[in-house]
Amino acid sequence: MLEHGGRLRHAAAQYGISVEQWLDLSTGINPLPWCAPAVPRLAWARLPESDDGLLQAAQEYYNAQHVLAVAGSQAAIMQLPRLRAAARVAILEPSYAEHALRWREAGHDVQSITISECTTAADTADVLILVNPNNPTGTRIPRSDLLKWHAHLASRGGWLVVDEAFADPDPSDSVASFTDRDGLIVLRSFGKFFGLAGARVGFVLATPRILRELESQLGPWPLAGPARFVARRALADHRWQIAMRTQLQSLAYRLRELLTRNGLTPAGGCSLFQWVPTPHAPTLHDSLAHQGILTRLFQAPKSLRFGIPAEEQQWHRLETALAAHQRSRV
């Protein structure tokens, strides 16, 4: 099992601080969620139906012709490796570690690559997997590069898989609208931008053949009726989306400034998190955790990912904790 952000109960037990007292900055999930309406009784009582308008809302939101709703993009990450015979798979690292794990588990030859090796990988690998913007570094890859690499892969029957879990706040480099092309697969997360990770909603954008094969692997009713109800309405709320993109951009700038003032200048990030590589990451992670603040610790390279605080009291608490850590090192 890999470690992930959000393991708040585990942290509470480890540090002896009750769950209610924690400030969880470990996930990169929008702390200002879309306000979900009450779910109708029938959404709970009946089996979900695919003609409820969710797919149409997703097609419009992502500007994609073909969409499959899944129980979080993680469900697709688990099953996509089963749709290909043994393949040479190149994955940009560091990145979301579940990709490499699941392709290796399925018997594929997985190689880690750097950004400078992507062009070569597009000419030699069968599958190239990228997260854009990357998690945890926040590195963005221009759409033009992605489409160029895809063309090279597709000419040999290969795939380009782009995990766009953090793309919603700024989708300018998204390749979602190009997924009618053979061999281009995009994964999108609903929970991160809309702040509703508990709904476990995600989408796969690809050609109908790939989506049919994936749907067969997942089986009927992969997404619960109440989650479908909420997701359809959130995807259609364009006014909230526009306002939230502006607000998150401002909050990300504030977080960068706060970290920089405390000697932790981010080396990357996006509107939902900031990434700070430092050899002192384990010590800082532990220091903050003893103060009830949970960050996401990475070992390779040693670094921390900070999510966005939700309210003024949380901003003050983070700055106070960072200042206390700085003083303890003097």
Image (cartoon, grey):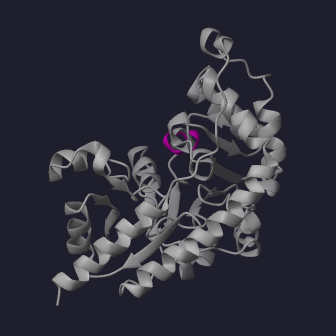
Q: Say if 233 sits above or below 237 in the image.
A: above
Q: Nearer the viewer, residue 165 or 40?
A: 40
Q: Is residue 174 magenta?
A: no
**Splitting the image into 4 quarters, where does residue 234 fall?**
top right
Q: Position of residue 110 (x, y in %)?
A: 44, 59
Placement of 211 over or under 155, stated as above or below: above
Please name the residue shown 34% across and 62% down the image.
295
Tell me: 221 left or right of 300: right
Camera-side residue of 54 and 307: 307
- Check the image and name the residue furthest to the top: 45
User: What's the residue at 67%, 61% (across, down)?
Assistant: 169
Q: Where is residue 258 in the image (x, y as percent from the top left)?
A: 45, 79
> Given the current orientation, which residue lies at the most extreme bottom position?
330
Q: Main secondary structure of the magenta part?
A: helix
Q: What stretch is highlighted in magenta?
A: 77-84
Compared with 83, 135 (above or below) is below
**Magenta-drawn stretch contains 82:** yes
For the point 56% across and 71% down, the residue is: 252
The residue drawn where x is 71% and y is 32% is: 212
| Residue 84, placed above or below residue 323 | above
On the image, the x and y values in percent for residue 55 come to 77, 34
Q: Quadrant of the C terminus?
A: bottom left
Q: Quadrant of residue 264?
A: bottom left
